[in-house]
């Protein structure tokens, strides 16, 4: 039988009906128990007599819950991840858009899939779908920068299958059904005082825990089987199982985004965002049972078998970035670069330090604003992951040394503050935002990378003094920060 | 009671026939749509090629032969009206484009040109779209064939004259017999 997405799309209706049935049963149970306790005062006979009314109320709540959860899954996920449409000025984003269009054709355009990019360095991809149309495949900047075209096709084919087969709809609905309880469970865990909330609302606490467990169990079961099917579908669409194996190999070895997504949405991702050492390599019986994803090694093994290859082919093909030391920079070249501004566009944004107009320039496949006088750089916060993910820049010995020195010094200062139990982050105001004129906060980029930047939270832009952007890139891209103690 | 039984005996097959007939109609329209999708992507390729040839002409001054072959193949593909001739002409154009892209690998300065890189990406994407459109069309044709030849749906399909369309076969690569 031909493998047509139109047929798969039609058959998913039965699965959606089953999911609604599960939801209805849950609401029936909850309504019955609440009715029994509050209205019928534990009189079972009365409760059963009024069963029809209970059923009607349950149906009403189930329909509302299902509609709400299934109708806004895409918008909710996009908002959590801060995903945006691809930037058509960027080569890789344009390639991503093209591949999405190709997959729309391959799947018969039964669902008009939209491609979105999440500004995260993690290596992951996910697909989301609403009940009535509206579906999207979201890739992180980190993953987009690491994949070849063939690998990108394979990953998107995998995600496209999830959408067309209805997996995403089920997962999105399942998450929406249970994620509320998951969020509540997380918030209770974060409570500093274990005595107050849990004792006072103990039954509700246990109901939340139960719903959380139910959500995780349902999600895990659905999720694991789906991933194998989607891998097979991707291999079938692209006729290139090696491409997906290679992509999974990169995802398995990279950071797939612990904390990248809120609780409950992990099952939507191609690789578990719990991290490389945990979910993606769990092989024990209990681990397999409780994992949202099958072990990535197992998935790669199956794909390699399809391609009649073995792991050594993947290991030899992994890209190796070369670091070239620029020991003796061409001084004339640097001067010419400063004088020649023909590749830059003058803007109406002024440098917050020099008060002179900034130039818009190309930097690591994105556009940033640079001051021709002080060499400071203004970068939109959502462009930073892209800059860090693209590894085109070569770092001079001078930048490397300063980066290590700054990281080391700031680390020592931070360690002293922690011993004195002072606030770790320091916030000071040095300058005003060139866009909104509000004060910018001077702070560390993060507690792991102690490069000071100036940030405007309203305009979502960051100011880097000369060399600070390169230093940050060096520390993150080469993982130099982890060697500093 | 007898009325319900008689109604069931006659009504159920009629209902089933209607459902199956509608599924044939839907599949038939899907096949036609898939065929037109191939046309759309082929046209996209026809529109892109002149831009690419113009852009690479300066860099590949010694490959006039290859560039002319692409232009001629494109012209034949656009003028072919018969389906078999059209398929042959398009395959010929695909072959010439692949040769041109392979030749372009010998010119590193080509890759550095952003405009050409963009065009190349669009061309690669178009070739993939054509391939996926063909693949999707062939999958639907296979589905149609399965439905017509299987029981009991095949009874309705053949009774109402539904036939399996031809597969979109590459002319240059005939399977070994």
Image (tube, coloured by chain):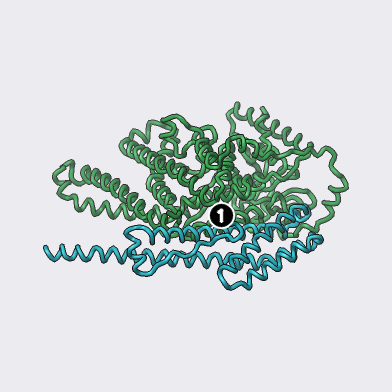
Chain colours: A green, B cyan
Q: In which quarter of the image is the C terminus of chain A?
A: top right
Q: x and y percent of residue A63 in the render?
A: 32, 55
Q: x and y percent of residue A352 in the render?
A: 72, 51
Judging by the rendered image, the residue that carries numbered circle 1 is: B175
Q: x and y percent of residue A192 in the render?
A: 45, 33
Which of the chains bears the disc numbered 1? B
- Image point 70% across, 31% down: which residue? A409
Residue B28 in which image quadrant: bottom left
Q: In this figure, what is the number of numbered marks?
A: 1
Let me know if residue B131 appears in the view.
yes
- Whether A204 is drawn above or below B8: the answer is above
Closer-to-camera residue (B47/A337): B47
- Whether B1 is drawn above or below A14: the answer is below
Q: In which quarter of the image is the N terminus of chain A?
A: bottom left
Closer-to-camera residue (A3/A136): A3
- Image point 67% across, 33% down: which residue? A481
Where disc 1 sits, the SS reads loop
Closer-to-camera residue (B71/A107): B71
Which residue is outermost to the right?
Answer: A332
Please tell me how crowded label 1 is: few (under 14), some (14-19), or many (20+) other residues with Cα within 10 Å. few
Q: x and y percent of residue A449 in the render?
A: 65, 37
Is A378 left or right of A372, judged from the image as shown? left
């Amino acid at each position: 039988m031909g493998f047509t997405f139109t047929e798969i799309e039609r058959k998913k209706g039965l699965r959606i009906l089953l999911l609604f049935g599960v939801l209805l049963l849950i609401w029936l149970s909850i309504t019955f128990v609440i009715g029994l306790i509050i209205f019928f005062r534990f009189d079972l006979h009365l409760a059963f007599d009024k069963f029809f009314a209970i059923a009607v109320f349950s149906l009403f709540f189930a329909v509302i819950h299902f509609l709400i959860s299934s109708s806004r899954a895409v918008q909710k996920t996009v908002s959590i991840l801060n995903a945006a449409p691809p930037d058509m000025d960027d080569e890789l984003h344009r390639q991503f858009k093209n591949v999405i269009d190709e997959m729309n054709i391959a799947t018969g355009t039964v669902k008009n899939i939209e491609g979105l990019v999440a500004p995260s360095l993690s290596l992951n991809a996910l697909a989301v779908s609403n009940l009535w149309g509206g579906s999207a495949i979201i890739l992180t900047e980190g993953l987009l920068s690491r994949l070849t075209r063939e690998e990108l096709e394979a990953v998107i084919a995998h995600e496209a299958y999830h959408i067309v087969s209805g997996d995403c709809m089920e997962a999105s609905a399942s998450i929406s059904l249970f994620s509320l309880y998951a969020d509540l469970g997380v918030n209770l865990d974060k409570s500093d005082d274990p005595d107050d909330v849990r004792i006072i609302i103990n039954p509700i606490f246990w109901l939340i825990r139960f719903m959380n467990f139910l959500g995780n169990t349902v999600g895990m079961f659905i999720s694991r089987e789906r991933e194998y099917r989607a891998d097979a579908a991707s291999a079938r669409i692209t006729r290139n199982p090696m491409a997906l194996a290679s992509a999974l190999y990169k995802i398995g070895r990279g950071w797939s985004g612990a904390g990248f997504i809120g609780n409950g949405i992990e099952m939507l991702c191609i690789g578990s965002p719990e991290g490389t050492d945990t979910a993606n390599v769990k092989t024990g019986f209990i681990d397999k049972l409780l994992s949202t994803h099958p072990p990535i090694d197992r998935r790669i093994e199956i794909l390699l078998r399809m391609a009649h290859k073995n792991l050594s082919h993947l290991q030899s093909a992994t890209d190796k970035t070369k670091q070239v030391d620029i020991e003796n920079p061409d001084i004339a070249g640097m001067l010419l670069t400063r004088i020649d501004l023909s590749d830059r566009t003058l803007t109406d944004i002024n440098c917050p330090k020099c008060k002179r107009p900034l130039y818009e320039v190309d930097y690591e496949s994105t556009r940033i604003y640079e001051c021709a006088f002080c060499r400071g750089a203004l970068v939109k916060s959502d462009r930073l992951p892209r800059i860090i993910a693209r590894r085109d820049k070569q770092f001079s010995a001078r930048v490397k040394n300063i980066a290590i020195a700054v990281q080391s010094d700031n680390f020592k200062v931070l360690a002293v503050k922690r011993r004195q139990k002072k606030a770790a982050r320091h916030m000071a105001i040095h300058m005003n935002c060139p866009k909104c004129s509000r004060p910018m906060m001077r702070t560390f980029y993060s507690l792991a990378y102690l490069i000071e930047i100036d940030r405007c939270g309203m305009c979502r832009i960051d100011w880097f003094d000369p060399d600070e952007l390169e230093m940050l890139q060096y520390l993150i891209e080469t993982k130099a920060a982890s060697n500093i103690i | 009671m007898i009325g319900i039984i008689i109604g069931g005996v006659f009504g159920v097959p009629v209902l089933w026939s209607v459902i199956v007939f509608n599924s044939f109609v839907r599949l038939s329209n899907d096949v036609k749509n898939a065929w037109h999708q191939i046309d759309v992507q082929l046209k996209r390729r026809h529109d892109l090629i002149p831009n690419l040839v113009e852009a690479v002409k300066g860099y590949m001054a010694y490959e006039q032969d290859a560039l002319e072959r692409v232009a001629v193949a494109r012209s034949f593909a656009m003028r072919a009206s018969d389906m078999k001739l059209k398929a042959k002409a398009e395959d010929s154009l695909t072959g010439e484009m692949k040769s041109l892209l392979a030749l372009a690998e010998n010119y590193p300065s080509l890759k550095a040109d952003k405009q050409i890189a963009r065009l190349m990406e669009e061309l690669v994407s178009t070739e993939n779209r054509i391939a996926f459109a063909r693949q999707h069309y062939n999958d639907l044709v296979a589905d149609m064939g399965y439905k017509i030849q299987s029981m009991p749906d095949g009874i309705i399909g053949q009774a109402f004259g539904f036939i399996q369309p031809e597969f979109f076969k590459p002319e240059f690569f005939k399977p070994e017999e």
